[in-house]
Amino acid sequence: LALGRNDDAIATLRGGLELAPEDADIHYQLGVTLDVVGDHAGAREMMLRVLELDLESDENPEEGLGDGEADELRALFDEVLEDMPGQLLDRVANVPVRVEVRPTEQDVRNGADPRCAIYLLGTAADADGE
């Protein structure tokens, strides 16, 4: 991509999927690449497949966060917010926080990266917090 050979990159990744259709990493890289070139629908399709494949390969797919883990993660997020510049903090300070093991299918449909540890979904507030 950095060399401007987007079509080559996409073709190579699609070729990789022909050889290994269940490889979540190739789906992920193709999704990222499609997003960069502006094919957001194609990227979303790849990311949904990544979520599906990652769930299939998860040894304990029903296992959630342990006791107190969600609270610990929220506390860490609060620490991050404390160090955030005021202008950015004003935009995210009142955003609801949901702690999950991974994003839901709907989250990915809405643009969340299925492999990202932290993501914000929604419309950013303006400078006045609205």
Image: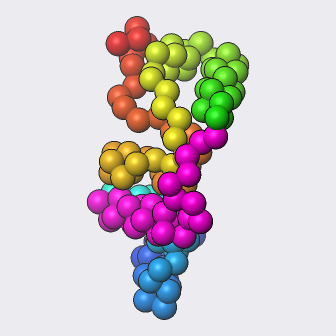
Q: Is residue 75 above or below residue 100?
A: above
**For the N terminus, which image quadrant?**
bottom right
- Residue closest to the eye, 3 or 95: 95
Residue under the image location 56 percent in, 17 percent down: 89
Residue 53 location (% of width, % of height): 47, 69
- Residue closest to the eye, 49 or 69: 69
**Span shown in magenta:** 41-66
In the figure, is residue 111 to the left or right of 20? left
Give the image's coloring scheme: rainbow
Residue 39 location (% of width, % of height): 33, 61
Residue under the image location 60 percent in, 32 percent down: 70
The extreme left residue here reads: 41
Specify whether residue 54 is painted magenta: yes
Residue 80 location (% of width, % of height): 67, 25
Residue under the image location 29 percent in, 60 percent down: 41
Residue 35 location (% of width, % of height): 41, 58
In the figure, is residue 80 to the left or right of 53? right
Task: Give the total number of marks visible in the rendering.
Answer: 0
Specify whether residue 77 is painted magenta: no
Residue 2 image-quadrant placement? bottom right
Q: Is residue 33 above or below residue 7?
A: above
